[in-house]
Amino acid sequence: MTDAPHPGGVTEIGEFEVARVGYGAMQLDPESASTKDAFALLRRAVELGVNHIDTASFYSYGEVNRRIRAALAPYGDDLVIVSKVGAKSVTGGVIPLAAAQRPAELRAAVEADLTQLGLDRIHVVNLRRLELGPGLEAVGDQIVDLDDQLAEMIALRDEGKIGAIGISSVPLETVRRAFPAGIVCVQNAYSVLNRAQEDLLEFCVAEGIAWVPFFPLGSSFPGFPKVADDPTVRAIAADLGVTPSQIGLAWLLAQASNTLLIPGTRSIAHLEENLGSDRIVLRADALARLDAVYDPSTDRLANGDGIEAFLDER
């Protein structure tokens, strides 16, 4: 779809080769972006070499998927679309999602992706477990054994409806258990200020699994720090004449070659800024200063805080 260089260079997610800096489409919901703006942003991303778009059928009842299809179909051969299952859209709650962990719900979500995106196969689908916060928790019949979920995901892969299986919001022990199913990527919260999952990152490096951090610049959830507000990040950004957000993304790219970024935005200016993080070279002294900012005692995910803490602060 474009001859532009892929931002950050390329690496693999399963059998698919993608730019190391992609795009997370969650913010393209109708409440946040007009149809015109959403289309313009998606097309600009592809023009700039992005060929990895992360989405889900539970983003605004599938409207984000439908916008991707309307803006980009027919898709280029190198465009990789990654989705996730394990939740569903709801209205009227504290957050616009509810658990959808049962195997039949996983299959229904994949079918919705295929219809909404106009695809015969989703390249990669992440199983979003609810073992790590924040955001959702599994209760009642939503407490589903991992093996039952993986059996459904493998069946969907065997049927050709998905190309590969990823997993999200899980600790290392769950990834170890799921690994024989052919896990190609892991999506977990991770940033310069949130490193509770570094042991999992090391496992992914060793096993050739793509590492796709969400909340790469922090989170809107209460009590989770924003990377751009950190004094050390801001000082290094000022020294280099770039933005604090770019420093946060550049730090992630420097951690491991299997890291894939999917920062989201509804602004073309911010999209271009995010993609520009691949041109920032962090020298050893800057990396050492950034490494030193992490404090495990204040990392809420490291200390097991999840949906309960979030709800308490609403």
Image (cartoon, rainbow, N blue to C red):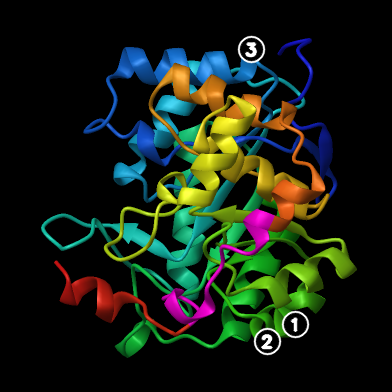
Q: How many marks?
A: 3
The residue that disc 3 covers is 47
- Please state if 205 lies on the left or on the right of 99 as rendered: right
Q: Report the Cα–Cα distance between label 2 and label 3.
A: 39 Å
Q: Residue at x 45, y 84 (%)?
A: 303
Q: Amino acid at mark 3?
A: Glu
Residue 182 appears in view:
no
Q: Reading the chain from its start, which is encountered first: label 2 or label 3?
A: 3
Q: Residue at x 36, y 41 (%)?
A: 62
Q: Residue at x 40, y 52 (%)?
A: 226
Q: Where 130 falls versus 127 (above or below)?
A: below
Q: Report the Cα–Cα distance between label 3 and label 1.
A: 38 Å
Give residue 173's mark: 2
Q: Where 199 falls versus 187 (above or below)?
A: below
**Residue range of the region highlighted in magenta in the rendering:** 289-302
Q: Amino acid at mark 1?
A: Arg
Q: Quadrant of the N terminus?
A: top right
Secondary-structure class at tag 3? helix
Q: Quadrant of residue 167?
A: bottom right
Graded by Cα atoms within 10 Å as few (under 14), some (14 to 19) or many (20 or more), the crowding at tag 3 reads some
Q: Estimate the x, y position of residue 244 in percent, counting from the top left.
A: 51, 38
> Which residue is at the front of the view, 148 or 186?
186
Q: Amino acid at mark 2?
A: Glu
Graded by Cα atoms within 10 Å as few (under 14), some (14 to 19) or many (20 or more), the crowding at tag 2 reads few
> Which residue is at the front of the view, 194 or 1?
194
Give residue 223's mark: none
Q: Quadrant of the C terminus?
A: bottom left
Secondary-structure class at tag 2? helix
Q: Reading the chain from its start, which is encountered first: label 3 or label 1?
A: 3
The residue that disc 1 covers is 176
Q: Where 261 falls versus 221 (above or below)?
A: above
- Please state if 218 lies on the left or on the right of 48 as rendered: left
